[in-house]
Amino acid sequence: MRTTFRTITAIGIAAGVALGLAPSASAHGKHRPPAPVTVVASGLAGPYQVSSSGRDLIVTEADAGRVVAINRHRRGSVRTLVSGLGEGAAAGAVRIGNKVLIATAEAGGPPDAPPRPPSPYPGSSVLVASKGRVSQFADLLAYELRNNPDGQTQFGPDGAPLDALSNPFSLLAARGGGVLVADGGANVVLRVSASGRVSTFFVPPVVTTGACAGRPNNDAASTGCDPVPTGLAYGPRNTLYVSTLSGEAPGQGRVYVLDARRGTVNRVISGFTSPTGVAVAPDGTVYVSEALEGQPTSEPGPDFDPSTVGQVVKVSPRGQRTYAQITTPTGIVWTGGKLYSTAWSLGSFFGQFGTGQIVALSPRAFR
């Protein structure tokens, strides 16, 4: 089954609604992270992805339908770059020169969220915002319908889509111009040129190991977990890292290390659970966000604390893993010699609105 950008929030629904989760009385008071983690900005509405541009962190607020810039040297400095995108529409964004490019996904949000106007812009697209104007830069759904890079059956006998056809999760400014797009619905990493031309860059394979073995998919010919690309980051020695959700199956998430020019696989780092973002330090240390690590597998008790859900995994160049507890992180980025992550990205699905944060993680955060 293909997985959409809203899969992570759907998981949040499963953890917070279907399991009868209610925020604990102390949950709001536990938003202050431990000393090795510094809050750079707070009060955000569903911060999903984060990229870097000079001194700024560019953050999409999915619950508010806007893109903001946060000066990482001035704590609490948040200014709006683009607004009015519609609830749930802003998946990822990058700033290139005086333009902001934005991936738009399926709209939607938690069932108890305050009502918001729908997005005036088409979903499954890359938009460009410049000088106060927003327009469509690339139509990702149209590309999927024409090319279907993963080759899966798109429509059932009744003509209805079997699942999301195209639903981008994140953007990365591409070397040489344009952007790369992790399209979770289409199961592909796309390249969008500086002129808006869309092409296929990398198609990760369906996962058929562990809990994914034999899992039903769109059709009998494609059993297993869809890869679902989520995060993108350049690494040393001309590499590109791609995190994949792998159907949320425990331990089946992957990070593909690609040749950044050709899109071919150099190696695979496995053993993650629902990875939603990836960042790479200059020395080759890899950081992976796992938004729902530690989520309840059965109905939690009244004392369940949602601030305990989620972590960032650090993988050293030698493969050693350590962990930092960050509440429901989705996007992460390495810039200026530091690691930054979203936190409380799924707060609204636990009944806590406007609790999102951007945090900086020091080496002492990992154990």
Image (cartoon, grey):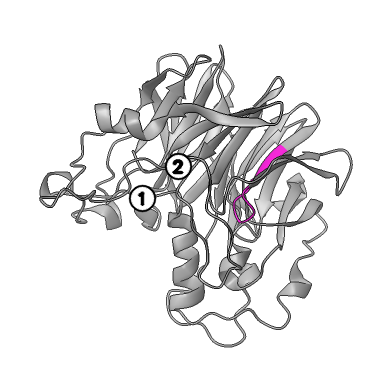
Residue type beneath disc 2: Gly
**Mark whose residue sits in front, 1 or 2:** 2
Q: Badge 2, how many Cα within 10 Å: few under 14, some, many 20+?
A: many
Segment tinted magenta in the rendering: 58-65
Q: In percent of the image, x 45 and y 49: which residue is there?
A: 106
Q: Secondary structure at mark 2?
A: loop
Q: Amino acid at mark 1?
A: Thr
The residue singled out by tag 2 in the image is: 123
Q: Which residue is mark 1?
A: 3
Please state the horizontal and vertical placement of residue 171, each as a whole percent of the image. 54, 33
Q: Percent x, y for residue 297?
A: 43, 74
Residue, x 59% and y 45% (percent of image)?
85
Q: Is residue 314 left or right of residue 188?
A: right
Front one among 264 and 342: 342
The C terminus: image quadrant: bottom right
Q: How many angstroms separate mark 1 from mark 2 (CA)?
A: 15 Å
Residue 63 among those drawn in magenta: yes
Nearer to us in this view, 8 or 68: 68
Res 247 visible: yes
Which element carries disc 1, helix, strand or loop? loop
Position of 70 compared to 167: left or right? Answer: right
Residue farthest top in this picture:
176
Whether residue 320 can be seen here: no
